[in-house]
Image (cartoon, grey):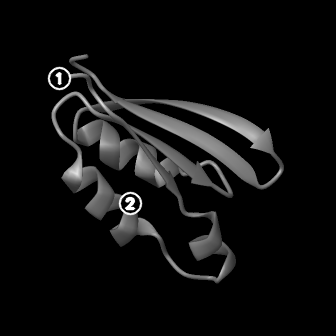
Amino acid sequence: MANQIVELDVRPILRRGEEPFSVIMDTVGKLQEGDSLVLHTTMKPVPLLKVLEGKGYRHECEQLAEDHWKVTFEPMQA
Protein backbone atom coordinates (compact mmCIF):
# COMPACT_ATOMS: atom_id res chain seq x y z
CA MET A 1 0.00 0.00 0.00
CA ALA A 2 1.35 3.42 -0.92
CA ASN A 3 2.29 5.82 1.82
CA GLN A 4 -0.04 8.76 2.20
CA ILE A 5 0.67 12.46 2.46
CA VAL A 6 -1.64 14.09 4.98
CA GLU A 7 -2.09 17.87 4.67
CA LEU A 8 -3.01 20.00 7.67
CA ASP A 9 -3.55 23.77 7.53
CA VAL A 10 -3.41 25.33 11.01
CA ARG A 11 -3.27 28.93 9.78
CA PRO A 12 -6.97 29.60 10.59
CA ILE A 13 -6.41 28.31 14.15
CA LEU A 14 -3.37 30.55 14.60
CA ARG A 15 -5.18 33.57 13.16
CA ARG A 16 -7.90 33.09 15.81
CA GLY A 17 -5.15 33.34 18.43
CA GLU A 18 -5.49 29.69 19.38
CA GLU A 19 -2.80 27.06 19.90
CA PRO A 20 -2.82 24.29 17.24
CA PHE A 21 -0.41 21.92 19.02
CA SER A 22 -3.08 19.41 20.10
CA VAL A 23 -4.60 19.35 16.59
CA ILE A 24 -1.16 18.74 15.08
CA MET A 25 -0.27 16.00 17.55
CA ASP A 26 -3.67 14.34 17.07
CA THR A 27 -3.03 14.27 13.32
CA VAL A 28 0.50 12.91 13.82
CA GLY A 29 -0.93 10.20 16.05
CA LYS A 30 -3.22 9.04 13.23
CA LEU A 31 -0.43 8.74 10.65
CA GLN A 32 0.27 5.21 9.48
CA GLU A 33 3.81 3.91 9.27
CA GLY A 34 5.56 5.61 6.36
CA ASP A 35 3.03 8.44 6.02
CA SER A 36 4.15 12.05 5.70
CA LEU A 37 2.57 15.22 7.05
CA VAL A 38 2.49 18.52 5.17
CA LEU A 39 1.76 21.30 7.64
CA HIS A 40 0.71 24.80 6.61
CA THR A 41 1.35 27.40 9.31
CA THR A 42 1.91 31.14 9.71
CA MET A 43 5.50 30.89 10.97
CA LYS A 44 8.38 28.45 11.16
CA PRO A 45 7.30 26.11 13.98
CA VAL A 46 10.73 25.69 15.59
CA PRO A 47 9.61 23.96 18.84
CA LEU A 48 7.43 21.53 16.85
CA LEU A 49 10.38 20.57 14.64
CA LYS A 50 12.22 19.23 17.70
CA VAL A 51 9.13 17.43 19.04
CA LEU A 52 8.53 15.58 15.78
CA GLU A 53 12.23 14.90 15.31
CA GLY A 54 12.01 13.09 18.64
CA LYS A 55 9.15 11.03 17.21
CA GLY A 56 11.25 9.98 14.22
CA TYR A 57 10.38 12.60 11.58
CA ARG A 58 12.77 14.69 9.53
CA HIS A 59 11.49 17.99 8.18
CA GLU A 60 11.83 20.40 5.30
CA CYS A 61 10.64 23.99 5.74
CA GLU A 62 9.65 26.27 2.89
CA GLN A 63 8.42 29.84 3.29
CA LEU A 64 5.78 30.47 0.64
CA ALA A 65 4.71 33.94 1.82
CA GLU A 66 5.31 36.24 4.77
CA ASP A 67 2.67 34.39 6.82
CA HIS A 68 2.67 31.00 5.07
CA TRP A 69 5.15 28.26 5.85
CA LYS A 70 4.90 24.77 4.40
CA VAL A 71 6.64 22.17 6.54
CA THR A 72 6.93 18.61 5.29
CA PHE A 73 7.54 15.93 7.91
CA GLU A 74 8.68 12.54 6.63
CA PRO A 75 9.59 9.42 8.60
CA MET A 76 13.35 9.09 8.99
CA GLN A 77 13.23 5.39 8.02
CA ALA A 78 11.55 6.06 4.67
Kind of residue at disc 2: Ile
Residue 24: assigned label: 2
Mark 2 secondary-structure assignment: helix
Report the side of 23 relative to 46 (left or right). left
**Of pointers 1 and 2, the one earlier in the residue sequence:** 1
Which quadrant of the figure has residue 5? top left
Place of residue 25 in the rendered image (x, y in percent of width and height, measured from the top left)? 30, 60
Q: Nearer the viewer, residue 62 or 31?
A: 31
Q: Position of residue 27 (x, y in %)?
A: 31, 57
Q: Is residue 14 above or below residue 18?
A: above
Height in image: 3 above or below 44? Answer: above
- Disc 1 packing (10 Å; few <14; some 14–19; many ≥20): few
Count the labels in the image.
Answer: 2
The residue furthest front is: 1
| Rendered location of residue 33, percent (x, y) | 16, 33
Could you tell me which quadrant the C terminus lies in?
top left
**Residue bearing mark 1:** 1
Q: Amino acid at mark 1?
A: Met
Residue at x 45%, y 53% (from the top left corner): 47
Front disc: 1 or 2: 1
Q: Who's the residue at 20% across and 54% down the image?
A: 29
> Label 1 vs label 2: CA separation?
24 Å
